[in-house]
Amino acid sequence: MFVRALGARRTAIPTTLLVTGLLGALLTAGCGHDDDPSVATPSTPPTSAAAPTSAAPASADSPTPAATASTPAVDREITVTIAKRRVNPPTGRVTVAKGQLVRITVTSDVADELHVHGYDLGARLPAGTPGSVQFRAEKTGLFEVETHETELVLFQLVVR
């Protein structure tokens, strides 16, 4: 409850300044680099070769890859390779169903950092060594998956 003295004026300037400052801080924060606590250490190379997935939209009823003893079952495995600043498969959209367990594995020919916007997940990408992030797709929407140093958009993740 707000109590004010008779004749006192209430002003919205402090609230406006607070909101403006907060929005400015959020907009200028952008993507963190090495100080981002969500950035994982490099992952070990997979024990079995995963088939590259297409950047074309996939239906929620696509088959689930078989899991090995060292890798947990995931609903969607997305594998990307970067060589000479070229993304393979070419940049596009990848669609997954809300609630699916997603693993993104990226191998780059130069050291970089993987980042999944909206989920604030990342992984270091040492040159020539795969880096992975794994997460449950609980947020719906369109999310860019990119590299930080080379600023390449790998694909747009669509969660429905």
Image (cartoon, rainbow, N blue to C red):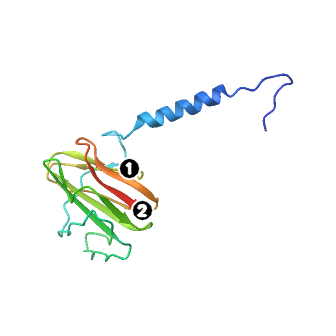
Q: 62 left or right of 5?
A: left
Is the residue marked by circle 2 packed among few (<14), some (14-19), or many (20+) residues within 10 Å? some
Is the residue marked by circle 1 packed among few (<14), some (14-19), or many (20+) residues within 10 Å? some
* Position of residue 113 measured from the top left corner of the image (x, y, whole percent): 26, 46
* Position of residue 20 measured from the top left corner of the image (x, y, whole percent): 55, 31
Instruction: Tell me which label, 1 or 2, sits earlier in the chain.
Output: 1
- Indicate whether 35 appears above or below 64: above
- 99, 152: nearer the viewer: 152
Amino acid identity at mark 1: His
Q: 57 left or right of 53?
A: right
- 73, 30: nearer the viewer: 30
Mark number displayed over residue 82: none
The residue at the point 85 percent across, 22 percent down is 7
**Which residue position holds label 1?**
117
The Cα–Cα distance between marks 1 and 2, rounded to whole angstroms, is: 12 Å
**Which residue position holds label 2?**
159
Determine whether the residue tagged by mark 1 lies in a helix, strand or loop: loop
Q: 24 left or right of 93?
A: right
The residue at the point 41 percent across, 53 percent down is 119
